[in-house]
Amino acid sequence: MKRIMMPLAATGAVALLAACGNTPAPGTDAAGASGPSVVAATTLSQADLGPKVQAALAKKGTFRVVSKTTGEDPGTLTADVKLGGATPEFVVNADGTTVMGVGGRLYGQGEGISDGAQWVKYDAKKKGLDALSGVVIQLIAWQAQPQQFLGATPYATKFTSAPGPDVDGVHTTLYDVTIDLEKAAQAKAFGNFITAESLAQEKTKTLSAKVLLDGDSLPRKIDYTFGAEGGSSVFSKFGDSVIIAAPPIDQVAK
């Protein structure tokens, strides 16, 4: 399950990473965001949902997402994301591990990645045991943007909309979506991270999600289910100030 869900919505998706953004580090501060909109949400079509959400987030430039997974290996992840540059930038904190995307590079620190305070830079050329830390870094980085799987909504077998509940005083529309993961993977909707081969190991071939979008097409909350496991992601701090800097060179393993 984690092979699929942790990347998916965190789990998040590589396909939209290039178009959207990544996540900032733990110490990112937020300031100056505009107050919540109370405009009634506009209903989007199945084809429009993914692109509209991406465009809305890109317009804001930054956001925070707190994701919680359930099931046999539950966890909590907090990500601050900054969009708008050549590549997304972000910092993700996940149960004692930190992953940072800055300047087109990925860095990781903590359990499963490094010893102590030392940072590890992701290197696709590493092999064997040295490559394991890179796998963990990629997996966590992918979770910086759980909204990314919405890029696969064209491959949904179910897509309905209805008025949703208010989230922090903001009106929303609820989208109930079930995505055919095999079709989405065949179409490369998740890039090369989720493939037909990796899905062959899973009994469940669909991802169900309840997505709450506000009147600006910004995601407010996503609840998702994959087989017996699932979780939720709550979005906030749209447009807040986020500062991300690469780790000092002397703190990065050579």
Image: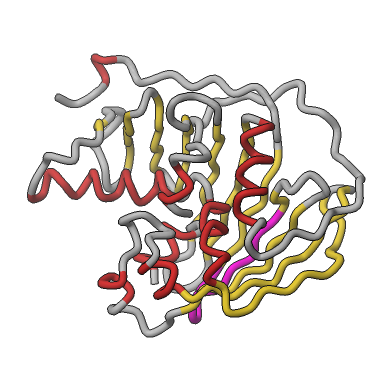
State the residue in front, 244 or 114: 244
Instruction: Using residue 175 as the reference point, say whether residue 3 is left or right of it.
Output: left
Which quadrant of the rendered structure holds the C terminus? top left
**Magenta run includes residue 223:** yes
Query: Which residue is rendered at x = 80% and y = 60% of the image?
Result: 43
Per the rendered image, the range of residues in magenta is: 221-230
Which quadrant of the rendered structure holds the N terminus? bottom left
Q: Quadrant of residue 107?
A: top left
Residue 123 vs 77, above or below: the answer is above
Query: Which residue is rendered at x = 75% and y = 59% of the image?
Result: 44
Residue 183: image location, x then y, percent: 42, 73
| Majority secondary structure of magenta residues | strand
Residue 89 vs 229, above or below: the answer is above
Query: Which residue is rendered at x = 32% and y = 36% of the image?
Result: 108
Q: How many discs mark residues in the rendered view?
A: 0
Instruction: Using residue 32 as the reference point, say whether residue 177 is left or right of it.
Output: left
The colouring scheme, among rainbow, by chain, secondary structure or one colour, is secondary structure
Residue 31 vs 39, above or below: the answer is above
Residue 97 vs 73, above or below: the answer is above
Residue 148: image location, x then y, percent: 52, 52
Residue 141: image location, x then y, percent: 40, 44
Residue 131: image location, x then y, percent: 15, 46
State the residue in front, 88 or 223: 88
Q: Quadrant of residue 185?
A: bottom left
**Magenta run includes residue 84:** no
Residue sticking out furthest to the bottom: 203
